[in-house]
Image (cartoon, rainbow, N blue to C red):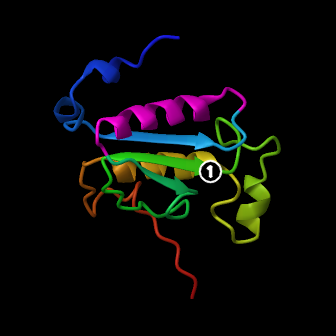
């Protein structure tokens, strides 16, 4: 088994990076185990890794995720696209999120970056309000 390239680096060097990870609980490729190994290595260097079960917002909210090392485990497979795409049916019945996890994955990754979102970034700051 190959060693993680970060394992040889000092915690101070790794501390200059942000690491966002997400994995489906039904991932058929075994990425969860790789993330478990990476988390164990980071923790052995005294770094705190935050883990979450599911996303902190819905598909239209960009959550602020300040944790430098974050793993989100979500219900689903590797990509987050269900076998049957129900997007049209969900949209027609008022559910703008549907079951496509991929949008939540992308928004969580954006929310974990240190790039500030401006109010003019409307493509990323959609809001849905029911009246």
Q: Which residue, as the protein is rendered here, is positioned at the far bottom?
A: 131
Rendered location of residue 116, percent (x, y): 24, 54
Q: Which residue is mark 1?
A: 74
- Determine the image quadrant of residue 80: top right
Rendered location of residue 89, percent (x, y): 79, 60
Q: Which residue, as the protein is rendered here, is positioned at the far top?
A: 2
Left or right side of 68 for 16? left
Give the residue drawn at x 68%, y 51%: 75
The secondary structure making up most of the magenta span is: helix
Give the residue drawn at x 69%, y 59%: 98
Residue closer to the observer: 128 or 7: 7
Residue 40 on the magenta span: yes
In this rendering, the count of numbered labels is 1
Rendered location of residue 82, percent (x, y): 76, 44
Point out the stretch of residues depicted in magenta: 28-47
Residue 21 on the magenta span: no
Give the residue drawn at x 40%, y 55%: 124
Rendered location of residue 107, percent (x, y): 46, 52
Residue closer to the observer: 35 or 74: 35
């Amino acid at each position: 088994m190959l060693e993680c390239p970060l394992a040889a680096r000092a915690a101070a060097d790794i501390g200059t990076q942000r690491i966002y990870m997400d994995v489906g609980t039904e991932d058929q490729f075994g990425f969860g185990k790789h993330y478990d190994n990476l988390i164990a290595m980071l923790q052995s260097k005294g770094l705190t890794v935050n883990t979450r079960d599911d996303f902190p917002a819905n598909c239209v909210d960009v959550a602020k995720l300040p944790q430098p090392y974050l793993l989100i485990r979500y219900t689903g497979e590797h990509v987050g696209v269900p076998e049957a795409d129900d997007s049209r049916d969900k949209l027609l019945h008022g559910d703008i999120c549907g079951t496509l996890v991929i949008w939540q994955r992308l928004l969580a990754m954006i929310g974990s970056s240190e790039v500030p979102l401006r109010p003019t970034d409307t493509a990323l700051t959609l809001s849905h309000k029911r009246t």
